Amino acid sequence: MDTKKFLLAGLIGGVVYFFLGWIVYGFILGDLMVLPEGFTNIEYPEEEFRISYMIMSCLATGFFLSYIFLKWAGISTFKSGAKAGAIIGLFISFMVGTSMVSMFKFALMANTLWDMLGSAITLGIAGGVIGWFIGRK
């Protein structure tokens, strides 16, 4: 595996994923994903938001896709990266969402469905960018 490509593709993909998440979840889906009655104080206020953990999460996602694409899947185009990213996003979101719905009263299946859409979009585009970067000459 080309370590330099892995690191650069993961970094670029993580940054793209971070900004797409901000747009998709912050502006587009934010008002659609609501909390049940009585669970309004579980999110951090904006001034207490832990951005460093969000950055780590997004970078880990970029490196995760980069590793899969380079090591196992041989993905090297925007189109194949976008397809794989969207499918991975759908499955991960569904797995985590249904697990949360089974255990926690604040988790709603409707939010899982919205998250599946958001994950397909954000990971699809980030995956496309990673695939493009890996395949560029």
Image (cartoon, rainbow, N blue to C red):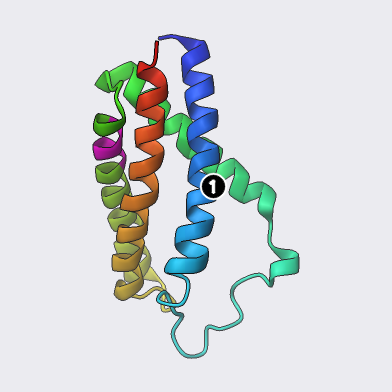
Report the amino acid beneath label 1: Phe
Return the x and y of residue 123 as percentages of the image width and height. Answer: 37, 44
Q: Quadrant of residue 64?
A: top left
Disc 1 designates what residue? 18
Q: Quadrant of residue 56?
A: top right
Image side of residue 113 versus residue 62, left or right: left
Residue 80 seen anywhere in this rendered image of the structure: yes
Q: Is residue 78 above or below residue 37?
A: above
Identify which residue, 136 or 55, lies in the foreground.
136
Q: Residue at x 41, y 39 (%)?
A: 126
Image side of residue 30 versus residue 132, left or right: right
Q: Residue at x 53, y 21 (%)?
A: 7
Residue 99 seen anywhere in this rendered image of the structure: no
Q: Quadrant of residue 41?
A: bottom right
Q: Is residue 5 magenta?
A: no
Return the x and y of residue 52 as percentages of the image width and height. Answer: 68, 47
> What residue range appears in magenta?
81-85
Identify which residue, 118 or 108, lies in the foreground.
118
